[in-house]
Amino acid sequence: MNEEEKKIYEAAIGKWGETMQLVVAVEELAELQQAIAKAVRSRTPETVQHVMEEAADVSIMLEQIGLIFSEDVEKNGLKAAAQIKAEKIERLHRRLQGGNV
Ligand SMILES: [Mg+2]
């Protein structure tokens, strides 16, 4: 996320609170699940557009989740999602090349 996006996310977390934003994240995940299921049942431009919209919503909430837990990650020497993601993509790459995990 860029600095402007980060400021907007922090303002949202400040305005509505961490707990509410985590609830919104859960709601958005459910909406994406539903949109994907609908697109699998009936793949039309409308259902695919709906998947894209819900994927964008989830992406926005995933970034807020990262911010909400960033202090815990720093304090406890945990790995941030971005680092874990990079490691998992690297592992996937190795698997695709037929190597051991
Ligand atoms: Mg949504």
Image: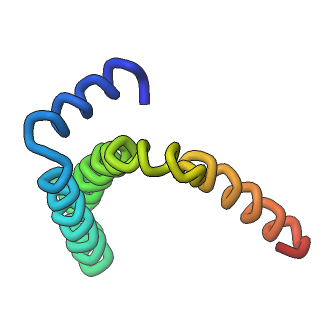
Residue drawn at 22 percent across, 57 percent down? 22
Q: Position of residue 23 (x, y in %)?
A: 16, 61
Please indicate, yes or no, whether residue 44 appears anywhere in the rendered image. Answer: no
Q: Quadrant of ligand 1?
A: bottom left
Q: Position of residue 74 (x, y in %)?
A: 52, 43
Please indicate, yes or no, whether residue 1 appears anywhere in the rendered image. Answer: yes
Quarter of the image for residue 16 reads: top left
> 42 or 11: which is nearer to us?
11
> 17 or 40: which is nearer to us?
17
- Placement of 42 over or under 97, stated as above or below: below
Q: Quadrant of the C terminus?
A: bottom right
Residue drawn at 87 percent across, 65 percent down? 97
> 52 or 10: which is nearer to us?
10
Name the colouring of the figure. Answer: rainbow
The reply, left or right, for residue 53 in relation to residue 75 is left
What is the number of callouts on the image? 0
The reply, left or right, for residue 74 in relation to residue 9 is right
Q: Quadrant of the N terminus?
A: top left
- Placement of 90 over or under 36, stated as above or below: above
**Please, which residue is most extreme toward the right here?**
99
Residue drawn at 15 percent across, 34 percent down? 14
